[in-house]
Image (spheres, helix red, strand yellow):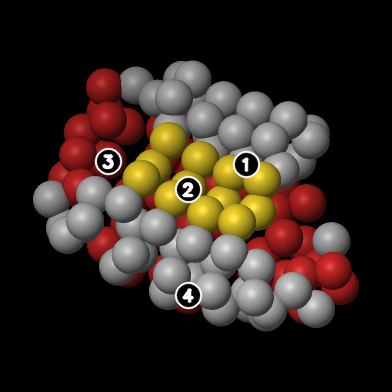
Amino acid sequence: LAPALSSASSLRRLALEGNGIGPDACRVLVSGLKDCPGLAELYLGNNQIGAAGAKILARDFPQCHQLRAVDVSWGHIGDEGAEAVAVAMPGMTALEELSLGGNDISDDGLVTLSRALKQCRRL
């Protein structure tokens, strides 16, 4: 996947829902996203991302300056993954849409996300 992304610099939308993507694939995906500066939509719902994968993705999300829509619903990220996403959110200046449904995020995780929402201008 990373080599394909490196030659897709004009990629605007990447939809990989339901592909069994886990933390290792997230690492590969992130290495290729650096070559897609115009990526605006990333759909990774219904995968096996987990907290570890969410941390990997969230660490690099702010470097995707055009990223306006992210879907990691049903990705098994839980509170730990939600916290990683919350930390990244203020740096995601173009973010307008974030889908986190079905991730077993507790009330504490939702509080963390809601605090981050206050710092997001477009979300």
Circle 2 packing at 10 Å, graded few (<14), some (14-19), many (20+), is many
Looking at the rendered structure, the secondary structure element under dot 1 is loop
Amino acid type of the residue that numbered disc 3 sits on in the rendered structure: Leu
Amino acid type of the residue that numbered disc 1 sits on in the rendered structure: Leu
**Residue 60, position in %: x, y?**
53, 67
Q: Does residue 55 appear anywhere in the picture?
A: no
* Residue placed under numbered mark 4 in the picture: 63
* Residue placed under numbered mark 3 in the picture: 113
Q: In front of the other: label 4 or label 3?
A: 4
Residue closer to the observer: 87 or 13: 13
Q: Residue 59 vs residue 24: left or right?
A: left
Amino acid type of the residue that numbered disc 4 sits on in the rendered structure: Gln
| Extreme residue toward the left, this view | 118
- CB of mark 3 within 8 Å of CB of mark 1? no
Q: What is the number of the mark on residue 70?
A: 2
Measure how far apart labels 4 and 3 are at the Cα level. Answer: 20 Å
Residue shown at 68% from the left, 35% from the top? 17
Q: In front of the other: label 3 or label 1?
A: 1
**Residue 25, position in %: x, y?**
78, 51
Circle 3 packing at 10 Å, graded few (<14), some (14-19), many (20+), is many
* Residue placed under numbered mark 1 in the picture: 44
Q: Quadrant of residue 107?
A: top left
> Which is more N-terminal, label 3 or label 4?
4
Q: Is residue 22 above or below residue 47?
A: below
Measure how far apart labels 2 and 3 are at the Cα level. Answer: 14 Å
- CB of mark 2 within 8 Å of CB of mark 1? yes
Measure how far apart labels 2 and 4 are at the Cα level. Answer: 14 Å
Quadrant of the image containing the N terminus = bottom right
